[in-house]
Image (spheres, rainbow, N blue to C red):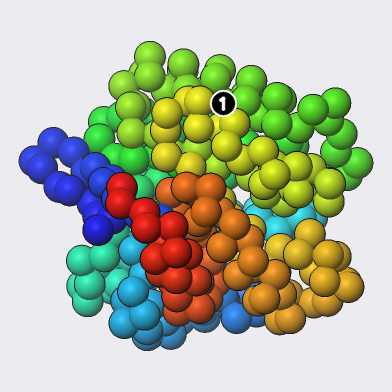
């Protein structure tokens, strides 16, 4: 199974199938209302439900990064995220990732029981987060983004979106390795500074990112390109489209799928892997 293997000096992801990362947003304004948790108790109950449904990683974030969003201050993010991570860690040993680009939040989260840093900024916003990942020997999710959450959807443009992301990854991977981070997960950043056609092109050519020989993460759950494809439907009506992406990514051997709805996505993965006779 997918797991965090813990030693006195590092926490390490192990892959033998497609893993499901469940989203818990300790925010009032994330784009999908179903992911918003307003209290520690509510977040813990959501985590317990995810564990029962077979989640492999629980991803906790305290700041919306939807297009056009403004950042919250660091103290507010800390107050949202850390108590939730501590509380979830007290009820389950399922790996926890912290969705943050701030190094102080990442460090406190690891001290509180988190196992993975999930940084949407590719260490562009706070480069010190690389040192946190290196010193604590934790996996680091390297995501591609163009701009910031506030500006990223203001007319993004690519000549070749996949080639540009690959160039970005190569430069960032080299830096991470030079600075002691070797457990890297690559996330092409669906919806982060991408046009509708860019998101589809990334998925169409997802195999090309395997040339880096690092695990791949795709976070497409209920995002706007799915809503557009299905007839401009709101986030609440995008589950079927999300499940189609999950089936496709499972077939393509994507390692982690970041989703809002654990059980249906878990069942799709299980069915796809049975059809594929996948033995990782």
Q: Residue at x 31, y 21 (%)?
A: 180
Q: Position of residue 105 (x, y in %)?
A: 42, 49
Tally the numbered discs. Answer: 1
**Could you say whether the residue bearing mark 1 is in a helix, strand or loop?**
helix
- Locate residue 117, reporting x and y percent: 40, 46
**Front in this rendered view, residue 153 or 269:** 269
How packed mark 1 is, by other alpha carbons closer than 10 Å (few <14, some 14-19, many 20 or more), is many
* Left/right of residue 2 with respect to residue 33 in the rendered view: left
Dividing the picture into quadrants, the one containing residue 87 is bottom left
The answer to whether residue 67 is left or right of residue 267 is: right
- Image quarter hosting the N terminus: bottom left
The residue under the point 22% across, 72% down is 92
Q: Nearer the viewer, residue 257 or 25?
A: 257
Residue 61 in picture, x, y percent from top left: 49, 61
According to the picture, the residue beneath numbered tag 1 turns out to be 169
In this rendering, position of residue 112 left or right of residue 117: left
Residue ranking furthest to the left: 8
Residue 198 versus residue 159 in the image, above or below: below
Could you tell me if residue 239 is visible in this image? Answer: yes
């Amino acid at each position: 199974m997918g797991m965090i293997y813990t030693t006195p000096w590092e926490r390490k992801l192990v892959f033998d199938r497609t893993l499901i990362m469940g989203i818990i947003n300790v925010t009032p304004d994330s784009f999908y209302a179903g992911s918003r948790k307003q209290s520690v108790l509510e977040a813990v109950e959501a985590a317990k439900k995810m564990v029962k449904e077979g989640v492999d990683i629980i991803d906790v974030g305290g700041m919306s990064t939807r297009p056009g969003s403004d950042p919250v201050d660091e103290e507010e993010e800390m107050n949202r995220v850390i108590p939730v991570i501590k509380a979830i860690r007290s009820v389950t040993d399922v790996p926890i990732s912290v969705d943050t680009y701030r190094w102080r939040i990442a460090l406190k989260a690891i001290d509180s029981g988190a196992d993975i840093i999930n940084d949407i900024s590719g260490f562009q916003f706070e480069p010190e987060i690389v040192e946190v990942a290196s010193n604590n020997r934790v996996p680091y999710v390297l995501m591609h983004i163009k701009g910031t959450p506030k500006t990223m959807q203001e007319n993004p443009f690519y000549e070749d979106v996949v080639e540009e992301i690959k160039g970005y990854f190569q430069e960032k991977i080299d830096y991470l390795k030079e600075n002691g981070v070797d457990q890297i997960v690559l996330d092409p950043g669906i919806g982060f500074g991408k046009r509708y056609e860019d998101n589809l092109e990334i998925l169409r050519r997802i195999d090309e990112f395997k040339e880096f020989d690092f695990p791949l993460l795709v976070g497409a759950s209920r995002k706007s390109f799915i809503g557009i494809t299905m007839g401009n439907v709101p986030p609440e009506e995008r589950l079927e489209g999300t499940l189609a992406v999950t089936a496709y990514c499972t077939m393509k051997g994507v390692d982690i799928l970041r989703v809002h709805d654990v059980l249906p996505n878990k069942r799709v993965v299980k069915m796809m892997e049975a059809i594929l006779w996948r033995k990782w």
